[in-house]
Image (cartoon, rainbow, N blue to C red):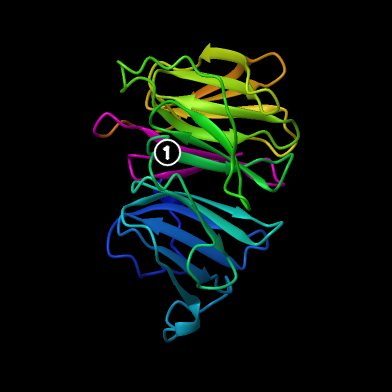
Amino acid sequence: SASLDVEPIYTFRAHNGPVLCVVMSSNGEQCYSGGTDGLIHGWNTTNPNIDPYDSYDPSVLRGAFVGHTDAVWGLVYSGAHQRLLSCSADGTIRLWKATEITPALNIFNDNQEMGIPSSVDLVSSDPSLMVASFNSGHTSIFNMETRQRILTLESSVDTTVSSSCQINRVISHPTLPISITAHEDRHIKFYDNNTGKLIHSMVAHLDAVTSLAVDPNGLYLMSGSHDCSIRLWNLESKTCIQEFTAHRKKFDESIHDVAFHPSKCYIASAGADALAKVFV
């Protein structure tokens, strides 16, 4: 209903093209955004009680992390090291120092040997590692400090059918050494980070799976898809315990992202219909 429409407290303006990803620091005091302009902007979040008619405060904009040469579509914040990870259409994954506007500390896949990275996440069980998925259908674990590729997860990629093997999202389980991937061919797959072996694979939706999230306790998986549905899965039994339609289709796309609140019983979704929704 229209009465539920919320007005923004503050609007950050600096990108000169669509913004593709946003991530908050652990304490909520900084925000980072990546866009089609290839820039990552850092922001100091404002006090929620700010008067919207106050004069502009230049200290809100911390500056731009410059280095990517194409759209930045994935960002992850590491609270343990105060680092920022980004993946871009230019084929690279970059590691940044989140506290300072400086050049990237490390660059991964700069020769595009794995393809174009589609998604990146921190490995929860080992904060020095990250897991990245690629449009080639491969998923690999890297050491962030040494840049070494430690493990490539087992995949049955048919390279002749490139469109269906794309991985849209990879996430790390918060408590177990498991990586979970969302696929263009409607599958969700679970991998063992120690051996690289496939643990479980399932057809999870009626269309491409676009987004994944695990609740902070590691018991439930939430998935979003272009079939307009959000599904909640019991991670132990790998069964769907709830499904609901959340967004309308636009240009054959529907749900772009899903998230669990870190402490409260809220979930959220963002869709191609230009809506962000919060569910209790």
Residue 179: x percent and y percent? 62, 29
**Location of residue 29 in the rendering, given as x and y in whole percent from the top left corner:** 62, 68
Q: Quadrant of residue 166?
A: top left
Residue 269 in sight from this viewpoint: no
Q: Is residue 218 left or right of residue 19?
A: right
Circle 1 sits on which residue? 118
Tell me where the magenta segment starts and ends, as one range: 251-280
Q: Is residue 278 magenta?
A: yes
Residue 148's place in the image compared with 201, above or below, is: below
- Give amino acid for label 1: Ser
- Work out which residue is located at the far left of the displayed protein and give it: 251
Residue situated furthest bottom in the rendering: 55
Could you tell whether 61 is left or right of 116 in the image? right
Task: From the viewer's side, name the closer residue of 47 and 24.
Answer: 24
Q: Is residue 124 visible?
A: yes
Residue at (50%, 70%) from the top-left corner? 43
Closest to the observer, 165 or 277:
165
| Quarter containing the C terminus | top right
SS class, disc 1: strand
Crowding at mark 1 (Cα within 10 Å: few <14, some 14-19, many 20+): many
Please state, as top left, top right, bottom left or bottom right, where the N terminus lies in the image: top left
Question: In x, y percent, where is residue 128?
Answer: 68, 48
Between 214 and 228, the one nearer to me in the picture: 214
Instruction: Verify whether residue 140 appears in magenta.
Output: no
Taking depth in this image into account, of 109 and 90 the one nearest to the observer is 109
Rendering coords of residue 44 (x, y %): 54, 73
Number of numbered discs present?
1
Q: Is residue 14 positioned above or below 142 on the image? A: below
Q: Residue at the location (40% across, 66% down)?
A: 66
Q: Name the residue rendered at 54%, 33% in the picture.
A: 140
Residue in the picture at 63% in, 23% down? 196
